[in-house]
Amino acid sequence: MSVPVETFFLDPDAQGTLQAQIQQMIAEAILSGRLPRGEKLPSTRALAKHLGVSRITVTLSYTELQASDYLSSKGRSGFYISENAPEPPSFQPRHRTEDKVDWNRAIGHSFSEVSTPQKPQNWRQNRYPFTYGQSDETLFDHNSWRLCALKALGQKDHDSMVRDYYDQDDPELVEFIARHILPRRGILARPEEILITLGAQNALWLSAQILLTQRRTAAIEDPCYYSLRDILMQSRCHLEPIAVDADGLPPEALPDGTDVIFATPSHQSPTTATMPLERRKRLLDRARELDALVVEDDYDFEMSFLQPPSPALKSLDKEGRVIYVGSFSKSLFPGLRLGYMVGSEPFIREARALRSTVLRHPPGLIQRSVAYFLSLGHYDALIRRIGKAYESRRNVMEQAISEHGLTASGSGVFGGSAFWMKAPVSVDTTELAELLKAQSVLIEPGKPFFAGSGRPRNFYRLAYSSIPTDRIPKGISLIAQEIEKLR
Amino acid sequence: MSVPVETFFLDPDAQGTLQAQIQQMIAEAILSGRLPRGEKLPSTRALAKHLGVSRITVTLSYTELQASDYLSSKGRSGFYISENAPEPPSFQPRHRTEDKVDWNRAIGHSFSEVSTPQKPQNWRQNRYPFTYGQSDETLFDHNSWRLCALKALGQKDHDSMVRDYYDQDDPELVEFIARHILPRRGILARPEEILITLGAQNALWLSAQILLTQRRTAAIEDPCYYSLRDILMQSRCHLEPIAVDADGLPPEALPDGTDVIFATPSHQSPTTATMPLERRKRLLDRARELDALVVEDDYDFEMSFLQPPSPALKSLDKEGRVIYVGSFSKSLFPGLRLGYMVGSEPFIREARALRSTVLRHPPGLIQRSVAYFLSLGHYDALIRRIGKAYESRRNVMEQAISEHGLTASGSGVFGGSAFWMKAPVSVDTTELAELLKAQSVLIEPGKPFFAGSGRPRNFYRLAYSSIPTDRIPKGISLIAQEIEKLR
């Protein structure tokens, strides 16, 4: 590959002759690792023209650099970075700036102090990854996805890929969600009531920005998805964590003054509890009493392989109180960053305006590819395949859990992709996770899911969405052994 | 296509016999437009199992609906929505919710009251689209882009597509930006100093959230990119619009107490002015005096086909005061939603944390496809091709502008993709744009770019990025005629 001439600039403050400056510029680029050995330099003519210097100056610089073995020449074909050029000190370009900014002062709002635990980026290298929320490539329908993306990359769909949608979405995707996804959850919605988001995370964030202020109160489940708590803490609203029980969030516990209730009725995160119909009705009654809204995160509903899922809370909502959040992260894959929210038109209008300011719209190519994946029926087939695989993994896991005397605190009546586990009270699962990691077993400690002080340390989550069936028994036995040692 | 059984639910509050409820459920779905004519219904067995009712109940419901011509049966192959089924009232599902929420109260922060002008979504249908910021498919290298996306969709890159990166980015893309894009702007940066964003819009938004508070002051150019002003107004900081001149932002006009300066030194938006080196140095000196930061939006730098672009302001920054924002919207296409920002590590750490809370990360497929497009050299070739086409369009346009006695107020010494035009003072270009639209000519009125009251009404922007060369003269003549009528 040859180095574009545009990458070269002379430092306007540089000292010395032009020839020396050019030599230094090239040598620095080699030393900083920007120009690897074997790459071709611009011709002397091109570089001279670009820098506005005479060609002989460039030629002299090149020749000089050749003499010191930074460059080599291959006859008429020009100059190359020499194979004997000095080795750059790894990938650390020499730094000419010295930071003079007091960043503690310059940063007006800090966002980096969140509690979100570090997730291992290399989970695939572990033998027993009971890792939650990542995609299993052995189950994914790579071929159909590729064909759909290919279709979306075609000439016919060029406009939908390249255009600036400003605050709009791909109408095809919106229509398929309205016609084929939402009805499965018992939800009827018009396009003006639907917004496409960068995943469920983005939908929850948008909701919090619009509905909450420093003077308002949000009720969250305890334990809950920790990223949601981070979102709400950043919004600086008042937070009321409500302890969940075996049926999920108890509506009676919602305090007066609650403005927004964040809930996972169909499949409580992380305990997997499903809220019975009776309680759902009471939750909506309580919301009416409080004149509160409910943000329903319906993550994982596609993974209802044991029984058909109960309809979404939104399907019972006759007053427009429920804002529904769905995602393709679990059914397709998380790196897609695609989700959607459904709510009353005045709310969706605000969410659309905010999304437009923050990022405009999710990429057109991603939206159209998913629209094809849905409309060609691959989505349904994929969900059935994943459900089947999860069911068999789940059965193996359930048996291993009981054989090794471990305790599942929540297992999800509809299916899902994980067990919520309880170790003996004396066991700190953060420590347990560290010890198991050394044995290539990945589990998720439960503590970050809980709010406040005195958080229980003995819960953990075991997912079966990324671990091959045949590794489950051994993985569970390693967990059991380690717990035995720790108790 | 057959209708998935999961889309059917019985209303838990419904009255009447089960058979009647099922009939009503299906009839409503047809009447609401959810089930179009010709689609196949689930088998009686499947639906009975799903709803937990007896099969005979479902059969009776289907037969009843067949009698009233909602359904038709094709012998053993099952039931279909009849071709004579009642027509749904367009795409407006019957709505069972009656909004009881007082949205004026429920919305804590409103975002929809921004000044951003409505952009025509159907600009392609116009004969003379002097439209800015959209992609021209005749110039785009569709084939190479498709091949790069295809490569990114391959088995080898599966993980980079599907994984949840949390707050991280595709390391390949970051490295290519560091090695091949930033050096053209005279910038050396380490990966920890680079963040990938959902376009430049997202980068500007992130900067504003982190650096500004209600007590801080941001200086912006006047006129400037109006979406930037919306972003800053939402941050509720104090705003100081600084009138630009033919050399861009005058540093001396920056008032004491300025905390952050938003600037477009290389190619002022929208006036196209390029800030001379001397003034850039004075801008940095003034920033140092104020202990302020500069957010440099380097949009459009790739379109420097007349002369090599001057290095970015960031390249002169020895103190870490400049935050650099780049984008692939102009060089690839806006629907990609991909940009990047470069800044000191403490700042990028905050931006990364905030981006992670808001949306996690730009989709992996998009990042990797662009990484290939860059690394295989298509990016450079594309920019050269676009530059060539823009140059010839620009020449034709310059000639037409002068022939018809129009006035270019700014034309960009390096190139770019638009002229900043000035009509006689008596002409309101918002009105002009409306009149021209009726003749299939699209221009952009200048008023939204200006701040405050007493904004000039007689400026407008004419882009040559989306209009074919041979339509330019006629388009310009139509504009000239209409201006003549209005003055």
Image (cartoon, coloured by chain):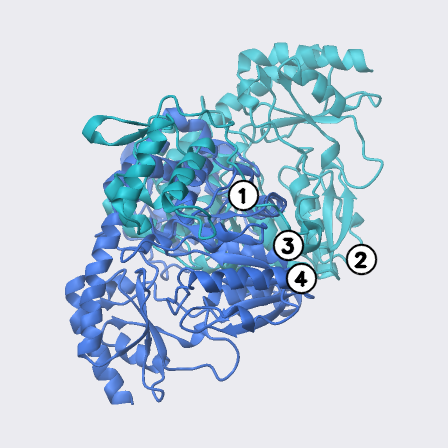
Chain colours: A blue, B cyan
Mark 2 or 1, which is nearer the eye? 1
Disc 3 to disc 2: CB gap under 8 Å: no
Q: Secondary structure at mark 2?
A: loop
**How many angstroms separate mark 4 from mark 2 (CA)?**
32 Å
* Identity, as a three-letter code, of the amino acid under mark 3: Ala
Chain label for disc 2: B
For discs 3 and 4, the disc positioned in front in the rendered view:
4
Q: Amino acid at mark 1?
A: Arg
Kind of element beneath mark 4: loop
Quarter of the rendering containing residue A428 = bottom left
Quick one: A477 or B276, which is closer to the camera?
A477
Give A73 or A223, whichever is nearer the viewer: A223
Which residue is label 4 attached to?
A: A213
User: Residue tagged by mark 2?
Assistant: B256
The answer to whether dots 1 and 4 both sit on one chain is: no
Q: Are marks 3 and 2 on the same chain?
A: yes
Q: Earlier in the sequence, mark 1 or mark 3?
A: 1
Going by the numbered disc 4, the residue's amino acid type is: Thr
> Which comes sooner in the sequence, label 3 or label 2?
3
